[in-house]
């Protein structure tokens, strides 16, 4: 009987199967590595694009923030300028108002000629003479305080009467009146308080 030894054939077949499996595994691993490398390259490109966009946006944000700070600075300067202008206008209006108020007040002062009713002015008859003048004039809001010198009490009373009848001033009150010697003349020192009368324009504004 003839015997055939099949061991070398089987061994060879096993080796070929193993070799085939290793080859398939290596090919699969190579394909996986190639795919991973390709995917990694795509991701890197996207990351670089995103980084470039982020840098561009950051630059734009920095520029906008700089412009915003400049705008805030300009607005601050404009606000300060408006405040200064408002203060100047307020001072100008007060100055103009004070000048007009003083002008109105001085119009109430009578310029008369000296008469025999004043013994201290004897020898000066028929000469222009100011019978009253101010030494102090203060206006705070509507409150007005006047201090001055007059020839006599009648001059003070006439001045107060003119203030009241002018309808520009109200609540005219004599605070004090006393004799004061000025250059050998016995004159009257006085203090008067009053308020500015409301005009129709002021009343309309309040309404």
Image: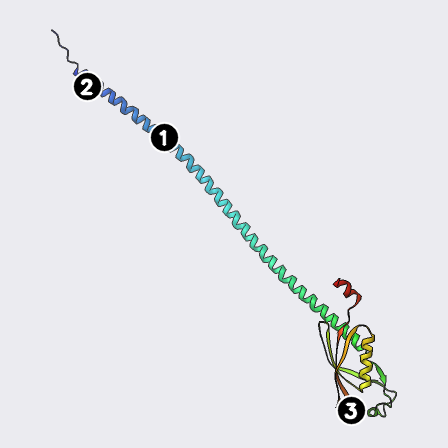
Colour scheme: rainbow
Which is in the foreground here, disc 2 or disc 1? 2
**Where does residue 179 sit, x and y in percent of width and height?**
76, 89
Q: Which image quarter: residue 128?
A: bottom right
Residue 44 horizontal/vertical position (percent): 42, 38
In this picture, residue 72 sits left or right of residue 33: right
**Residue at image coords 36%, 30%:** 34
Q: Is residue 144 above or below residue 27?
A: below
Residue 107 visible? The answer is: no
Camera-nearest label, 3 or 2: 3
Q: Is the residue 108 above or below the residue 29 in the image?
A: below
User: Between residues 52 and 192, which one lies in front from this camera angle?
Assistant: 192
Question: Neighbour class for label 3 at 10 Å: few (<14), some, many (≥20)?
Answer: some
x and y percentages locating residue 29 in the rendered image: 32, 29
In depth, the one of 95 and 64 nearer the eye is 95
Q: State which quadrant residue 120 falls in.
A: bottom right
Q: Disc 1 on helix, strand or loop?
A: helix
Which residue is more in the foreground, 88 or 33?
88
Say left or right for 204 vs 126.
left
Question: What residue is disc 2 on?
Answer: 11
Q: Is residue 104 something that shows in the picture?
A: yes
Residue 34: image tag: 1
Q: State left or right for residue 69 relative to residue 191.
A: left
Q: CA distance from mark 1 to mark 3?
A: 123 Å
Where residue 103 appears, x then y in whole percent? 78, 75
Q: Which residue is mark 3?
A: 186
Q: Earlier in the sequence, mark 2 or mark 1?
A: 2
Q: Earlier in the sequence, mark 1 or mark 3?
A: 1
Q: Residue at x 54, y 53 (%)?
A: 66
**Where 101 falls versus 185 (above or below)?**
above
Name the residue located 78 percent from the left edge and 91 percent from the top edge. Answer: 186
Secondary element at tag 3: strand
């Amino acid at each position: 009987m003839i015997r055939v030894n099949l061991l070398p054939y089987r061994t060879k077949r096993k080796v070929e199967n193993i070799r085939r499996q290793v080859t398939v595994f290596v090919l699969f691993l190579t394909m996986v590595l190639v795919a991973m490398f390709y995917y990694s390259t795509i991701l890197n490109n996207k990351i670089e694009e995103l980084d470039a966009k982020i840098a561009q946006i950051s630059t734009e944000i920095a520029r906008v923030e700089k412009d915003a700070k400049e705008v805030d600075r300009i607005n601050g300067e404009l606000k300060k300028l408006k405040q200064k202008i408002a203060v100047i206008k307020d001072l100008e209006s007060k100055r103009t108002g004070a000048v007009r108020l003083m002008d109105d007040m001085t119009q109430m002062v009578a310029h008369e000629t000296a008469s025999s009713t004043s013994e201290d002015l004897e020898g000066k008859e028929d000469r222009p003479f100011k019978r009253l003048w101010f030494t102090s004039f203060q206006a705070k809001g509507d409150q007005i305080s006047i201090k001055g010198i007059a020839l006599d009490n009648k001059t003070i009373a006439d001045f107060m009467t003119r203030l009241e009848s002018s309808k520009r001033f109200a609540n005219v009150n004599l605070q004090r009146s006393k004799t004061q010697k000025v250059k050998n003349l016995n004159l009257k020192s006085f203090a008067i308080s009053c308020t500015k009368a409301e005009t129709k324009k002021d009343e309309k504004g309040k309404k």
